[in-house]
Every structure is written in structure tokens, then in C-alpha cells.
Image (tube, rainbow, N blue to C red):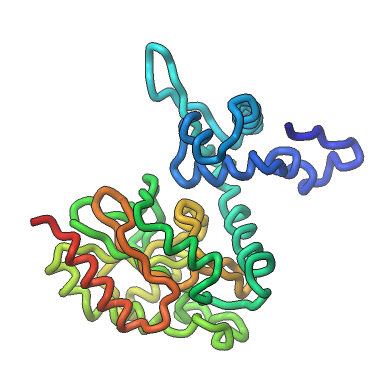
């Protein structure tokens, strides 16, 4: 179980945070609830943890305000575990840990917005088909909160990109990071093909970690017809364990294209994306194949 914070560290926020989520199981429980696993049995199955330890860790996270118990059944009453506002605020920390490990433990330390075909993050991303995206909403450039998946369409294409250079300037050395260049081009190509996507009954969403107001200015300048979603709070990144990199003191999404059906299941993934025009064409071909007869 978590340790009590020694008196000498009572004013240390790092020590206080470590007392709550510094335990291996506690961090993995935050990871799994962010991925949409909320019930005791599914958490136990996914983590391979004993019932005793799981009960203790869940109680600790509830007492610490990271999780809350929400009843989902009466007679007998059964609960599931949901992230609180404090728990959701941990997601950027979790994604930062993933990013650090992808680069420094599972990679060779290179700063890149792409990935090798045999890298751990590529294997993890390629394992996404069959994964169901939990229900969540993200801020859109339109000023509303939107579900990343359009339930009124047979399929939704989510294309993740690092950042556009408008309106804010990109960080120094941006163009020297492999995989960063091409975000404006990608948006334009999806814009130009948007009529083909809509004719096929397919929704399109662009996703970056830029703020909605930045995305709004870009969308207006480029006449973008589809929603741009902001994952600045890392909810989508944590839910799907998407690959990221850090530049300009901010987490950025690596370029990836996902196709999901209306039941929120990932059906296709392109990562790394090295040929942007072909990625757009491929997304349209795959999404067309998901149309209902």
C-alpha cells in the first residue's frame, strides 16, 4: 500500500503525489480506467492482480480522490470505478511517462515524431484494431465538446498530427525533428477529399494537442470543413495509448490515422505515416469498406 509522507517531506508536492500514485498497481489502475475498464472483474483480468491487492488499491485511490465508485447495478449493489476530475488531471502525467519510456527505455533516446516499424510504440499502435474507444468528448475548434466518433456515420477517420504553424510559431528546431513537417498539407488533403468522405458516409476529425482557439484560427484560414479536436488534456492519448513526443515543452501527437466504426471500435491504423497523400487515400478506401449494405 502507499506510504505515509514523512514529516520532512510534508510540503513536497512530489512526495505527496508519490504517496497517492507512486505505487505500480495504482498507476496501472489509472491507466486502465482511462482506457475504459471500470469494473472490478475486468480490471483484475486485465492486470492479473490478486483480488486482495486490487481491493486495497481501489480503496486507496477512492480515498485519495482519484477514483469514485459509481453504482451500475441494484440488488445486489455493484459499483464501477471512474476517474474523478483529479484522476483525469493525472492523464497528461501518465502520457508523459509513456512518452519518456518510449524514447529512453524502449527506444534509443532519439527525439522523433515518427517511429521505426519494429519499435514498441509501433507494435502497440498496430495492436489497436479491435479496441473500443471509451466514451469521451474533446474540445472542438467550433467552441463545442464533441465525441471523436460520429455515431451518425458508418465510420469515422481520426487523423492525429503534431501541430500546425498557424497561428502560433512552431518551436525552434521543429523541422529538424523527423515526422513533424506536413501537418498543414495533411489538413489540406483531407479538406480537398472531404466531399469524397462525406459521399461515402464517413466522418473526418483532425486531432492535435493544440488549444481550440489555435485550431479555430487555423481552420478559418484554411477553410477546414471538419472538426479539429484538441487533446490538450491527453484524454484520447491515454484512452488509446497513442504515440507522442515532446517539443517546445509540450506533448505532441505523432502522426497517425485511425478508422473507427460507429460502435467505437478501431478497425484500421496507419502508423507511422510516411506518405501523407497515400494515408489519406488509404483511409478513404478502408472507411468505404465499413459502410453498411
Q: x%, y% of residue 105? A: 68, 65
Quarter of the picture holding the N terminus: top right
Res 224 quadrant in image: bottom left
Quarter of the picture holding the C terminus: bottom left
Q: Is residue 90 above or below residue 76?
A: below
Q: x%, y% of residue 156? A: 27, 60
Name the residue: 76% across, 41% down: 16
**Is residue 50 shown to the viewer in this render?**
yes
With 112 as the anchor, is 235 left or right in this view? left
Q: Is residue 135 above or below residue 118?
A: above
**Is residue 146 shown to the viewer in this render?**
no
Res 240 quadrant in image: bottom left
Name the residue: 58% across, 88% down: 176
Name the residue: 50% across, 60% down: 232
Q: x%, y% of residue 279? A: 32, 77
Q: x%, y% of residue 29? A: 57, 40
Q: Is residue 231 above or below residue 84?
A: below
Which residue ends up furthest to the left in the rendered image? 293
Amino acid at each position: 500500500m502507499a506510504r505515509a509522507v514523512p514529516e520532512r517531506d510534508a510540503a513536497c508536492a512530489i512526495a505527496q503525489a508519490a504517496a497517492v500514485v507512486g505505487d505500480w498497481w495504482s498507476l496501472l489502475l489509472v491507466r486502465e480506467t482511462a482506457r475504459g475498464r471500470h469494473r472490478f472483474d475486468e480490471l483484475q483480468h486485465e492486470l492479473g492482480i490478486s483480488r486482495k491487492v486490487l481491493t486495497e488499491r481501489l480503496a486507496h485511490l477512492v480515498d485519495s480522490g482519484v477514483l469514485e465508485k459509481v453504482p451500475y447495478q441494484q440488488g445486489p449493489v455493484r459499483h464501477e470505478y471512474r476517474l474523478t476530475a483529479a484522476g483525469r488531471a493525472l492523464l497528461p502525467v501518465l502520457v508523459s511517462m509513456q512518452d519518456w519510456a518510449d524514447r529512453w527505455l524502449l527506444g534509443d533516446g532519439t527525439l522523433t515524431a515518427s517511429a521505426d516499424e519494429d519499435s514498441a510504440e509501433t507494435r502497440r499502435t498496430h495492436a489497436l484494431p479491435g479496441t473500443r474507444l471509451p466514451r469521451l468528448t474533446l474540445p472542438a475548434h467550433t467552441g463545442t465538446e464533441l465525441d471523436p466518433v460520429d455515431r451518425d456515420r458508418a465510420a469515422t477517420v481520426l487523423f492525429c498530427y503534431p501541430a500546425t504553424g498557424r497561428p502560433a510559431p512552431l518551436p525552434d528546431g521543429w523541422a529538424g525533428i523527423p515526422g513533424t513537417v506536413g501537418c498543414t498539407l495533411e489538413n489540406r488533403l483531407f479538406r480537398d477529399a472531404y466531399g469524397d468522405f462525406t459521399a461515402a458516409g464517413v466522418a473526418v476529425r483532425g486531432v492535435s494537442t493544440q488549444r481550440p482557439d489555435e485550431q479555430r484560427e487555423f481552420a478559418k484560414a484554411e477553410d477546414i470543413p471538419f472538426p479539429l479536436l484538441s487533446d490538450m488534456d491527453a484524454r484520447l492519448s491515454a484512452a488509446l495509448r497513442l504515440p507522442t513526443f515532446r517539443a517546445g515543452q509540450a506533448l505532441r501527437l505523432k502522426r497517425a490515422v485511425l478508422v473507427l466504426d460507429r460502435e467505437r471500435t478501431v478497425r484500421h491504423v496507419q502508423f507511422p505515416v510516411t506518405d501523407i497523400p497515400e494515408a489519406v487515400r488509404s483511409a478513404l478506401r478502408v472507411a468505404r469498406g465499413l459502410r453498411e449494405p
